[in-house]
Image: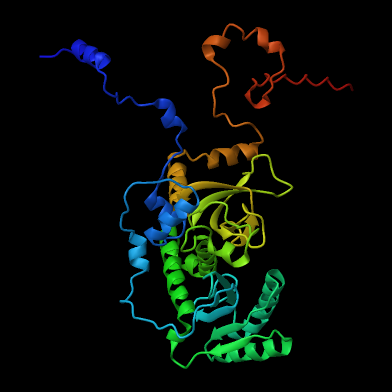
């Protein structure tokens, strides 16, 4: 039988490689991210897209893929059907744009119920707009088309859409504005001719449902925040790399020098603490406000986020955010659990406030240590009048006898 000392001697005299862990190498190695957690952080895309996005952003993934429950619930669909390509794909960004409108019965907190989606044929980059009514299509798209003309230095050549009334009105207003865009109207009841935007809608709606399911918020609140989830899903879709894996879709569309508004992926519906920026605050008021993370602020520097304040019921833009890495439901559950374990002192505090004295919740004096110094401290005025011994009453002088 070989003793431990013999094992150590054999290890020291052996010439083979030793499997010794290098603590310093382990400390210097970057931490790995779970592939399932990263899949959730970037909005529940496919795992192939998750790996490509991690590789493009130098994120090292670990672990094995597991079936995502929220994806299974939110993306269940029928079998795919073949689609024919009627026109060759555009080669330049913004050469041909596909657009369509998807509606749903519930209005958002801003009063919108229509989702207008524009997809570029060459780069697959997409843009989302939200309308209160479909007749606002031209009012929203014409300034957008003019802005693209100014940024890219050239105008759009084709717009493909169905022959709905709002699109025909858009065609007339584009002709009056002199934009020089040719409209390709699809045949009635033939969405296959406008398949690029139709497939993009199906993909984004699946991610929106998965993000809302994972947020674990009330159904009423989610119905009011569906536009924010759709907007965030659009931003994350443009954040994904292209087929070659070199750069994201937005950079392919706008070219070099484009700066993304996404600094790092976040989980939709995550609980956050936002700094209270009111100028006048009481000394005991909280300096942070619980909020729900909704997405990234448009036309702002990266690091500015759109938050939903549960206190005011409004959406705010801020950069002073602390992420708690838990859902808002988990945050409320932990807070309620903490409050249930805390003794109820509201009656004591209210009573002491009414009597205008300090609550006697702590023993300020120790009977053993202060018994000997009781006589010496009698001449010293007490800092707490309510705790000082009350002076003995002085008898009133007797009345003088009346003189007659």
- In the picture as drawn, the residue positioned furthest to the left comes out as 1
* Camera-nearest residue between 322 and 258: 258
Residue at image location 55% in from the left, 10% down from the top: 369
- In the picture as drawn, the residue positioned furthest to the right comes out as 404
Q: Position of residue 404 (x, y in %)?
A: 89, 23
Residue at image location 43% in from the left, 56% down from the top: 52
Q: Is residue 238 above or below residue 175?
A: above
Q: Is residue 376 above or below residue 259?
A: above
Residue 253 sits in quarter: bottom right
Residue 122 seen by the camera: yes
* Camera-nearest residue between 9 and 333: 9
Total number of numbered discs in the rendering:
0
Residue at image location 56% in from the left, 54% down from the top: 291
Q: Position of residue 1 (x, y in %)?
A: 10, 14
Residue at image location 64% in from the left, 37% down from the top: 355
Residue 70 sits in quarter: bottom left
* Camera-nearest residue between 335 and 303: 303
Residue 104 seen by the camera: no
Q: Is residue 180 left or right of residue 332?
A: right
Q: Is residue 165 above or below residue 394?
A: below
């Amino acid at each position: 039988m070989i003793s431990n000392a013999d094992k150590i001697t054999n290890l020291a005299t052996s010439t083979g490689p030793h499997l010794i862990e290098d603590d310093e190498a382990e400390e210097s190695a970057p931490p790995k991210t779970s592939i399932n957690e990263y899949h959730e952080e970037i909005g529940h895309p496919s795992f192939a897209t998750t790996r490509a996005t991690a590789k493009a952003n130098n994120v090292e993934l670990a672990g094995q893929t597991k079936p995502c429950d929220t994806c299974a619930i939110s993306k269940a669909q029928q079998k795919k059907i073949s689609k024919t390509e009627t026109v060759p794909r555009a080669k330049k960004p913004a050469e041909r744009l596909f657009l369509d409108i998807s509606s749903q019965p519930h209005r958002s907190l801003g009063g919108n119920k229509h989702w207008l989606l524009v997809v570029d044929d060459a780069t697959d980059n997409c843009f989302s707009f939200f309308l209160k009514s479909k007749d606002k299509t031209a009012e929203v798209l014409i300034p957008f088309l003019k802005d693209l003309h100014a940024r890219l230095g050239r105008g759009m050549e084709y717009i493909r859409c169905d022959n709905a009334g709002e699109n025909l009105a858009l065609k007339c207003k584009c002709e009056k504005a002199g934009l020089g865009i040719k409209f390709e109207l699809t045949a009635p009841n033939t969405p296959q001719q406008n398949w690029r935007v139709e497939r993009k809608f199906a993909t984004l709606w699946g991610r929106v449902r998965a993000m809302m399911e994972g947020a674990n918020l009330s159904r009423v609140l989610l119905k009011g925040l569906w536009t924010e989830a759709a907007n965030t899903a659009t931003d994350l879709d443009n954040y994904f790399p292209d087929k070659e894996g070199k750069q994201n879709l937005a950079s392919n569309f706008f070219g070099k020098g484009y700066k993304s508004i996404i600094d790092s992926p976040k989980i939709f519906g995550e609980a956050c603490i936002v700094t209270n920026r009111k100028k006048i605050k009481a000394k005991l008021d909280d300096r942070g406000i619980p909020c729900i993370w909704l997405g990234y602020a448009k036309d702002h520097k990266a690091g500015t986020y759109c938050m939903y304040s549960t206190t005011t019921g409004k959406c705010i833009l801020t950069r002073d955010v602390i992420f708690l890495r838990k859902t808002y439901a988990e945050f409320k559950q932990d807070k309620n659990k903490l409050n249930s374990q805390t003794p109820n002192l509201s009656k004591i505090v209210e009573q002491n406030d009414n009597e205008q004295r300090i609550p006697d919740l702590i023993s300020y004096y120790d009977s053993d240590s202060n018994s000997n110094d009781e006589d010496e401290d009698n001449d010293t005025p007490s800092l707490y009048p309510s705790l000082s011994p009350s002076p003995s009453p002085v008898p009133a002088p007797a009345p003088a006898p009346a003189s007659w």
